[in-house]
Image: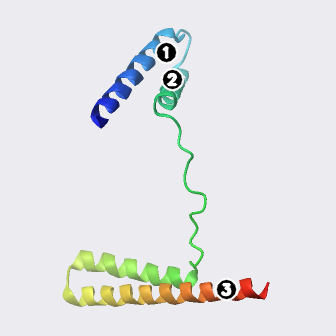
Amino acid sequence: MYGSLRRKRREDYRCMVRDKVEEAKWKGLDVKEHWQQIKCIMMETAQVICGMSKGPCRHKETWWWNEKVAEAVRNKKIKYGKWKKENMKEVRKEYKKSRQNAKRVISSVKEKKQKDFANDSVSK
């Protein structure tokens, strides 16, 4: 079912692009203008056939992120890269410690921010 729908859309897209390309006026255009016209045809057709999404989520904000968390995560990433590069047990232990530390830091910062938010809500 889903595959046949995708094939139909693909065929509709091809036909519509082909029709628009045949209708377009190409004489007297340089390469840049030619490409721009083809790009516009393809984008408009894709929008008609596939539709348009609303875009990315606007509320994707990490409210608890701060410099302390950033440092812990940065350290964890560095240790991970080192472990993957060297593949040694000692380096893996270092990575695991930094991973646990990052989790601990994130947890404590989240808890502190939640308490601050709760205190601000109550005091207002």
Regarding mark 2 in the picture, which secondary structure is present there?
A: helix
Q: Position of residue 103 (x, y in %)?
A: 42, 85
User: For residue 118, which numbered disc appears in the image?
Assistant: 3
Judge by depth and name the residue closer to the eye, 69 or 53: 53
Q: Position of residue 14 (x, y in %)?
A: 38, 21
Regarding mark 3 in the picture, which secondary structure is present there?
A: helix
Marked residue nearer the N-terminal end (1 or 2): 1
Label 1 vs label 3: CA separation? 59 Å
Circles 1 and 2: CB distance less than 8 Å?
yes
User: For residue 41, which numbered disc appears in the image?
Assistant: 2
Q: Nearer the viewer, mark 1 or mark 3?
A: 3
Left or right: 47 with respect to 82? right
Q: Position of residue 15 (x, y in %)?
A: 40, 17
Residue at mark 1:
20
Marked residue nearer the N-terminal end (1 or 3): 1
Q: Residue at x 58, y 67 (%)?
A: 61
Mark 1 neighbour density, 10 Å: few (under 14) some (14–19) many (20 or more): some
Q: Amino acid at mark 2?
A: Ile
Q: Amino acid at mark 1?
A: Lys
Above or below, comparing residue 60 to residue 110 in the picture: above
Judge by depth and name the residue closer to the eye, 124 or 87: 124
Q: Residue at x 38, y 79 (%)?
A: 78
Marked residue nearer the N-terminal end (2 or 3): 2
